[in-house]
Amino acid sequence: MLSLWLLAFFGVAILAYGAYRTVIVFRRRTRTGQRSEENRDWGTCAHCSQTFRYQLVHNGFNDSAYAYCDCCGYTVTVDAWSQHPPRLRLQYHRPLPREAEPFLRPCPCGGAFREGAHPRCPNCKQPLSADLATSYIEANARGTAKGWRWDRRWNGVYSIIVEERSVINWWKPEEMQAASTGHQATTL
Ligand SMILES: [Zn+2]
Ligand SMILES: [Zn+2]
């Protein structure tokens, strides 16, 4: 009789555990589904009406500086935590200055990263208007409800990465060679 009770008890326990696991897995799936949906910010090109995914980067939180390719709108980001050419003095939290241009490798498309270049539509390659971008950037940003506003310019603290078309710390290798020698000299 006791063994029957034990059997029933374990049977119920196993069933309950199975149900619990199912609920947990289901909740996890729902939660990750929501999260990826939230991260998927979409913009629309004013020239060709094509939609594209983008990511807005706060270069202040990121301790970084940025520039865009003058041909395709690729984004280059350099961060304060990585080595940079020793001959170049840099300020972060803003666009890269003209003086940084000779130190940067060419864009993967063959173009050049330049001060004053704009992000571009990945489809028609026309520059994206910072003014027109306000509608989708503010609509997508969760902070807008709490009063956050897009500053309507491509040379502020925010940079944009379109369709993950970006490179990081994209310095010319020969300049970095100089950096490692310089670093050794200072540590010795
Ligand atoms: Zn390019
Ligand atoms: Zn376009």
Image (cartoon, helix red, strand yellow):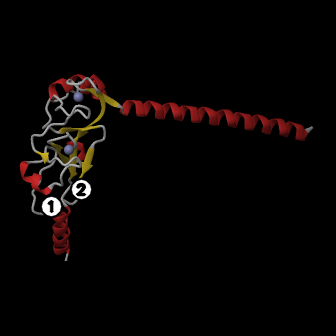
Is residue 88 shown above or below 64? below
Q: Residues within 10 Å of mark 2 (few under 14, many from 20)?
A: few
Q: Residue furthest left?
A: 99
Q: Residue at x 20, y 63 (%)?
A: 173
- For the C terminus, which image quadrant? bottom left
Q: Residue at x 18, y 72 (%)?
A: 181
User: From mark 2 to mark 1, how far is it between C-alphas?
Assistant: 13 Å
* Label 2 close to label 1 by CB (< 8 Å): no
- For the N terminus, which image quadrant? top right
Classify residue 121 by image quadrant: top left
Q: Secondary structure at mark 1?
A: loop
Name the side, left or right, on which 44 lies relative to 101: right
Question: How many badges with numbers are in the image?
Answer: 2
Is residue 44 shown above or below 7? above
Residue 57, percent from left and from top:
25, 39
Q: Residues within 10 Å of mark 1 (few under 14, many from 20)?
A: many
Q: Residue at x 16, y 68 (%)?
A: 178
Classify residue 75 by image quadrant: top left
Residue 29, percent from left and from top:
52, 34
**Marking on residue 81:** 2
Residue 26, percent from left and from top:
57, 32
Q: Which amino acid is tagged 2?
A: Trp
Viewer-proximal residue among 131 and 3: 131
Which residue was labeled with disc 1?
A: 85
